Image: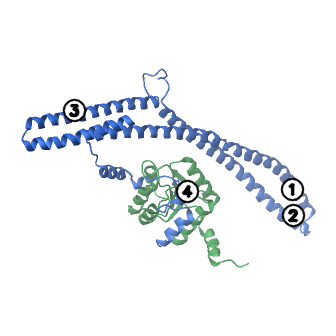
Chain colours: A blue, B green
């Protein structure tokens, strides 16, 4: 770091010193000296530039090694960490989808059983009420007793099925543990990649200073913004509670729409 | 027990809603389509069809016979907002009631959907009650 600052300071002081001398020699009409000074300036600049480009190249190389995608590495057959991360995330999607479908299968299997038992209990209860009020005859009572008997048997079996389904629904949530671990690892990788990229950007900016390259930052920013297509949608908002431009829930949506006359 | 007038009105409407109306559910995630389908079935609507984005939804809409459209916003191919604009621009479809069920939660997006002519907006994650409320409100307003 110290070395870099020193190089930059060298370049800047040489530039300043030579600039003064250049003006002086031009004023004195010594054009030969002036050309010599410009040549020296160029050389200093080039030396710094080469050094920075060299550093950038080395940094780039070590960054590539850090990404584990250097084809000359012994474990080259292994997939790169990025490809690996993509596969891991695809696995998360697969696992969560399977869990959602498994849960819905079990719910769809249980709902008619519960609804059926509820409906039958309601009907039996009505007929039982008629019996208690002595509104039914002996023949009807025998029929009612038979229905109650079959209801009790069936409610026991179906209760067992629903209870087993509930346990399976509980077990279907085990994806949370696995996907949580995968997502944490991918998050770590993204953080590493970002810090490596940031280092490269800093290196590149050093080269820019020597080469005197100025980027049109406003234009870059404008280009970035125009790429955000509103119609495409943004997906779920993560910090909805702290942002003013985002609704915090259905109540907020309803308020907004009613303020628009809905 | 007396109940507020608007609650009683709601009960009446619930009976009046045509449970046989054909509903098109558009979402790119099959699990979300399944959740919405199940919730609609719980509300008594069993006549549903599905599409995974605007591009596949349009031919189904053009065949006619769809009475109600429930769509997500963020989908590959044609998004929900584009689908909504198509529907409103089409002479035969422009009166179709559209409910948006989406994770898109920016105020300007909700305003955009309202201006494009959406009839209701439900943000994910949502509850069964919220979905029921919006559907009832939409048909209450349409009459």
Disc 2 to disc 3, C-alpha distance? 106 Å
Q: Give left or right: position of B93 versus A153.
A: left
The residue at 53%/39% (across/down) is A188
Asked if both marks, 4 and 2, belong to the same chain, the answer given is no
Which label's residue is closer to the chain start, 1 or 2?
A: 2
A198 or B23, which is in the foreground? Answer: A198
Q: Seen from this angle, which residue lies furthest top?
A: A74
Q: Residue B73, labelled with which disc?
A: none
- Where is residue B8 drawn, in percent x and y? 65, 75
Are circles 1 and 2 on residues that touch, CB within 8 Å? yes
Q: From the image, tell me which residue sits under label 2.
A: A128
Disc 4 to disc 2, C-alpha distance? 45 Å
Q: On screen, B126 above or below A176?
A: below
Q: From the image, tell me which residue sits under label 3.
A: A43
Disc 3 to disc 4, C-alpha distance? 62 Å
Q: Count of labels shown?
A: 4
Q: From the image, tell me which residue sits under label 4.
A: B124
Chain under callout 4: B
Q: Nearer the viewer, mark 3 or mark 4?
A: 3
Q: Residues within 10 Å of mark 1 (few under 14, many from 20)?
A: some
Are circles 1 and 3 on residues that touch, CB within 8 Å? no
Chain under callout 2: A
């Amino acid at each position: 770091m110290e070395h870099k600052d020193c190089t930059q300071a060298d370049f800047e002081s040489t530039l300043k010193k030579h600039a003064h001398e250049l003006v002086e020699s031009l004023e004195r009409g010594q054009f030969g000296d002036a050309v010599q000074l410009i040549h020296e300036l160029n050389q200093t600049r080039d030396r710094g530039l080469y050094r920075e480009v060299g550093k950038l190249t080395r940094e780039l190389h070590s960054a590539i090694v850090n990404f584990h995608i250097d084809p000359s590495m012994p474990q080259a057959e292994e997939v790169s960490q990025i490809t690996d991360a993509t596969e891991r995330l695809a696995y998360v999607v697969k696992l969560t989808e399977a869990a959602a479908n498994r849960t819905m299968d079990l719910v769809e299997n249980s709902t008619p059983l519960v609804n059926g038992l509820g409906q039958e209990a309601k009907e039996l209860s009505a007929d039982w009420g008629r019996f208690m009020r002595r509104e039914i005859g002996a023949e009807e009572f025998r029929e009612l007793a038979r229905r109650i008997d079959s209801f009790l048997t069936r409610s026991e079996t179906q209760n067992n099925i629903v209870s087993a389904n509930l346990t399976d629904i509980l077990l279907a949530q085990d994806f949370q543990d696995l996907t949580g671990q995968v997502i944490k690892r991918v998050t770590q990788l993204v953080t590493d990649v970002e810090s490596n990229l940031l280092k490269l950007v800093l290196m590149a900016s050093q080269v820019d200073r020597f080469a005197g390259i100025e980027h049109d930052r406003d234009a870059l920013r404008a280009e970035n913004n125009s790429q955000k297509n509103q119609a495409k949608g943004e997906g779920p908002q993560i910090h909805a509670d702290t942002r003013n431009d985002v609704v915090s829930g259905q109540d907020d949506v309803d308020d907004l729409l009613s303020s628009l006359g809905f | 027990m007396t109940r507020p007038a608007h609650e009683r009105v709601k009960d009446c409407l619930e009976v009046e809603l045509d449970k046989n109306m054909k509903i098109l559910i558009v979402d790119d995630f099959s699990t979300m389509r399944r959740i919405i389908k199940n919730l609609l079935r719980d509300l008594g609507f069993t006549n549903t069809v599905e599409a995974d984005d605007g591009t596949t939804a349009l031919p189904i809409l053009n065949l006619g016979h769809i009475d109600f459209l429930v769509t997500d916003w963020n989908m590959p191919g044609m998004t929900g907002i584009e689908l909504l604009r198509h529907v409103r621009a089409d002479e035969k479809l422009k009166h179709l009631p559209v409910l948006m069920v989406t994770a898109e939660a920016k105020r300007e997006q909700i305003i955009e959907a309202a201006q494009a002519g959406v009839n209701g907006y439900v943000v994910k994650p949502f509850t069964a009650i919220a979905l029921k409320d919006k559907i009832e409100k939409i048909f209450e307003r349409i009459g």
